[in-house]
Image (cartoon, rainbow, N blue to C red):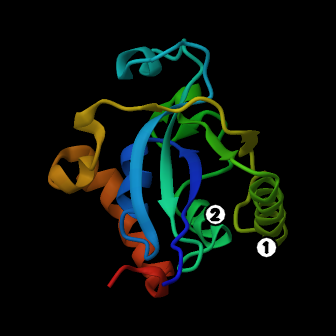
């Protein structure tokens, strides 16, 4: 019997509902958890993070099987489903909590993140420079229960219909081969 090993990827790219909804559909992804990372306040609440004073980013922690989906592929998805060129902003969501960031868990993840950013830059996928921060993972704080699987539980809510849904559709269009069956 083969030993199943998983890895963790931690990504921030605007509202965590968007990222969670996409990564939940990726084959090899075992779980996606919305939460907060990269700040100074211990045990921050959603209200504190939205206030912009904690330094935390809304992020997702993805547990995945690297035998089924690579960290590199997770990052390729990341750079398609959010705008990595807007500092502290995704659409109408504005503030440091909405920054684009990759929080790496190993030197290998850091290397891959920097390589993917260089490739996306070279491919000129965006007309402006990428501002995604690459930083070591720090303490993770799980978001409140009502944020977990938000899109799955609230698909007709306004933000989900007009913001989350199109990101899920974009993922499905560009990465059909990585969809869970």
What residue sits right under mark 1 in the picture?
123
On screen, residue 33 versus residue 119, left or right, reads left
Numbered label tally: 2
**Relative to 113, is 57 above or below?**
above
Real-space CA distance between mark 1 and mark 2, rounded to the nearest whole angstrom:
15 Å
Q: Position of residue 48 (x, y in %)?
A: 42, 14
**Relative to 81, is 68 above or below?**
below
Residue occupying the far front of the picture: 1
On screen, residue 136 versus residue 145, left or right, reads right
Neighbour tally class for label 1: few under 14, some 14-19, many 20 plus, Cα within 10 Å: few
x 52%, y 14%: residue: 42
**Relative to 152, is 134 above or below?**
above
Of badges 1 and 2, nearer the viewer stands 2
x 47%, y 87%: residue: 177
Asked which secondary structure carries label 1, the reply is: helix
Name the foreground residue: 56 vs 138: 138
Neighbour tally class for label 2: few under 14, some 14-19, many 20 plus, Cα within 10 Å: some
The reply to whether residue 167 is visible in this rendering is no
Which quadrant of the figure contains the C terminus?
bottom left
Q: Position of residue 131 (x, y in %)?
A: 74, 44
**Relative to 5, is 157 above or below?**
above
Q: Quadrant of residue 113?
A: bottom right
The reply to whether residue 82 is visible in this rendering is yes
Q: Position of residue 84 (x, y in %)?
A: 65, 51
What residue sits right under mark 2 in the picture?
75
Q: Position of residue 168 (x, y in %)?
A: 37, 65
Name the foreground residue: 70 vs 75: 70
Asked which secondary structure carries label 2, the reply is: helix
């Amino acid at each position: 019997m083969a030993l199943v090993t998983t890895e963790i990827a931690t990504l921030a790219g605007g509202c965590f509902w968007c990222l969670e909804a996409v990564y939940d559909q990726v084959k090899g992804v075992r779980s996606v958890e919305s939460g907060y990372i990269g700040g100074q306040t211990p045990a921050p609440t959603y209200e504190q993070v939205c206030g912009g004073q904690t330094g935390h980013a809304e992020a997702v922690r993805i547990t995945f099987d690297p035998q089924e989906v690579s960290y590199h592929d997770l990052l390729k998805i990341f750079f398609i489903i959010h705008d990595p060129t807007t500092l502290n902003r995704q659409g109408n969501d504005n503030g440091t909590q909405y920054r684009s960031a990759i929080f790496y868990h190993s030197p290998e993840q850091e290397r891959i993140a920097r390589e993917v950013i260089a490739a996306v830059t070279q491919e000129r996928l965006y007309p402006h420079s990428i501002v995604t921060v690459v930083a070591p993972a720090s303490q993770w704080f799980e978001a409140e229960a009502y944020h977990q699987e938000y899109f799955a539980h609230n698909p007709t809510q306004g933000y989900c219909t007009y913001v989350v849904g199109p990101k899920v559709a974009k993922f499905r269009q560009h990465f059909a081969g990585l969809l869970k069956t």
